[in-house]
Image (cartoon, grey):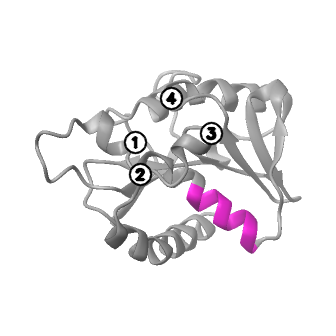
Amino acid sequence: MKLLVGLGNPGKKYERTRHNVGFLVVDEIAKQLNLTFKNKTAIEAEIAESEEIVLLKPQTFMNVSGRAVKAFLSKNKCNVSDILVIYDDADISFGELRLKKTGSSGGHNGMQSIIEQFPNGTAITRLRVGIGRPTNSDIPLDAFVLQKWSGEEEKKLPEIITKAIAIVMEQK
């Protein structure tokens, strides 16, 4: 079974924000596979699943996403090599995608929270979706990631999500 974890923040307030790009990708995968997300309060996540794949959206806030991943793994058999985490990365230009099989969180608190659930050095595959940094230096990064996409970014999102899904599906 493949576990795809899309990172984001729960609630209407955070929909369509840069920080929720992981949710956007797994939402589109669910749509393409005709899967429906169900709220699983016991593991603090929404899950959509088939026999081959589980899509997980933690319903904790980003910085404690690891709780939902750990809770899911405590109730379900899944090899760490079958986990792929999808999240935003401000250190990558908008629209650029990078797949990594291992490494640090790169300062991303959601990914750090997941890494902390495993023994040191555990390889966790991740797909980082570039959101870039604010062009205005007066906008703090934490505020920028929680902003809605610009109109120009919004137009490019479908293509970026399509490319992200292609990369994810190649990992099956």
Which residue is nearer to you in this view: 18 or 164?
A: 18
Residue under label 3, please give it: 11
Q: Secondary structure at mark 2?
A: helix
State the predominant SS element of the stretch in magenta: helix
Magenta residues span 24-32
Q: Secondary structure at mark 3?
A: loop
Label number found at residue 25: none
* Number of residues whose C-alpha sits closer than 10 Å to that of mark 1, classed few (under 14), some (14–19) or many (20 or more): some
Q: Earlier in the sequence, mark 4 or mark 1?
A: 4
Count of marks, rendered view:
4
Residue under label 2, please give it: 18
Q: Earlier in the sequence, mark 2 or mark 1?
A: 2
Residue 27 is situated, as x and y percent measured from the top left of the image, at 66, 60
Residue under label 4, please give it: 115
Task: Give the residue displayed 58% in from the left and 61% down from the top.
Answer: 25
Q: Earlier in the sequence, mark 4 or mark 3?
A: 3
Q: Earlier in the sequence, mark 2 or mark 4?
A: 2
Q: Earlier in the sequence, mark 1 or mark 3?
A: 3
Which residue is nearer to you in this view: 132 or 143?
A: 143
